[in-house]
Image (cartoon, helix red, strand yellow):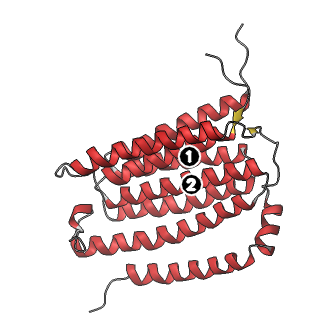
Amino acid sequence: MIPFPNLDVLAFLVLATFAVLCGLSVILQKHAVASALSLVGVMGSLAVLYLMLGAEFLAAVQMIVYAGAIMVLFVFVIMLLNAGSEKKGPPRYFAYFVGLPALAVFLGLIATFILREMPHTASVQFGAFTQGGPAPVGRLLFTQYLLPFEVTSLLVLIAIIGAMVLAKKEID
Amino acid sequence: MMLPNAVPVSWYLVLSAILFSLGVAGFLMRRNIITVFMCIELMLNAVNLSFVAFSYELKKIDGQLFTFFVMVVAAAEAAVGLAIILTVFRHRMSLEIDDVSSLKN
């Protein structure tokens, strides 16, 4: 009889596979809407991974803000501009023969470094770390991180005004 | 194949590195401005995952707050970036990244 695998391990493997497949789909799909939907898949699986790491508040924010608001904005712009599939252009030899190998080397190095230099990291168990709810996050946000929070509100205000100014039709 | 009994935090970091590399690869390969922008979002998400993983490792929620700030900046960036894409499309009638090369050379 095959022993039933640990659910933490099983969930991580399933979600990680799904996230990587969706990430591949983001960069390989020819159509922008298909890429956007794959990106929603990546964000959803990351939200569940956040839950497993004890970040409940962030998981909810990830689904609402990222998969909800930001991706709706993307899909809206894709449909507004009627972005079809990409046209063929001249091949990019520099990206293919320098960029991608360098990227593969980077990934190999960083994965080797993580797995070799950090062999004794804590093992992730769902429910082992429960400080990520709204109450502790909010308390820290409004005490120690109050100034960054307020600066963030200024940033969002500037972004609203900037987006309006950029997107409005020029009045000649 | 034997599955281990628990997932170490380092696996989450490797997953984060893989997703980040996918984002960089898409950034290098794609020609559509919107898709390139989505690849940037993919990279931001990958970095967020490593912030949350380190937050678990250190048993402190400061990393989660950093993720929160990254999300806010990403939202602002998406709003402004998509407005820029709209303006570029209105002026050049094209979403190809090679057509927007006024600053090249």
The amino acid at mark 1 is: Ser
Q: Quadrant of the N terminus of chain B?
A: top right
Q: Relative to residue B6, is residue A34 drawn left or right?
A: left
Task: Give the vertical position of B102 relative to A84 (above or below).
Answer: below
N-terminal-most mark, 1 or 2? 1
Residue A161, horizontal then vertical, whole percent: 49, 84
For residue B42, side relative to residue A92 (left or right): right
- Residue A49 position in % (x across, y down): 65, 44
The answer to whether residue A25 is visible is no
The answer to whether the residue labelled 1 contacts the one labelled 2, judged by CB atoms less than 8 Å apart, is yes
Query: What secondary structure is found at the residue carrying circle 1?
Result: helix
Q: Which residue is mark 2?
A: B47
* Circle number at residue A38: none
- On screen, residue A108 above or below A141: above
Residue in the picture at 45% in, 74% down? B80
The chain ID associated with circle 1 is B
Image position, residue B44 (x, y; %): 52, 57
Q: Nearer the viewer, residue A53 or A57?
A: A53
Identify the residue position indicated by label 1 in the image. B16
Closer to the camera in the image, A20 or B12: B12
**Chain letter of disc 2 in the image:** B
Tell me the crowding category of disc 1: few under 14, some 14 to 19, or many 20 or more residues within 10 angstroms, Cα based: many
Residue B84 in view:
yes
Q: Residue at x 79, y 51 (%)?
A: B59
Q: Quadrant of residue A116?
A: top right
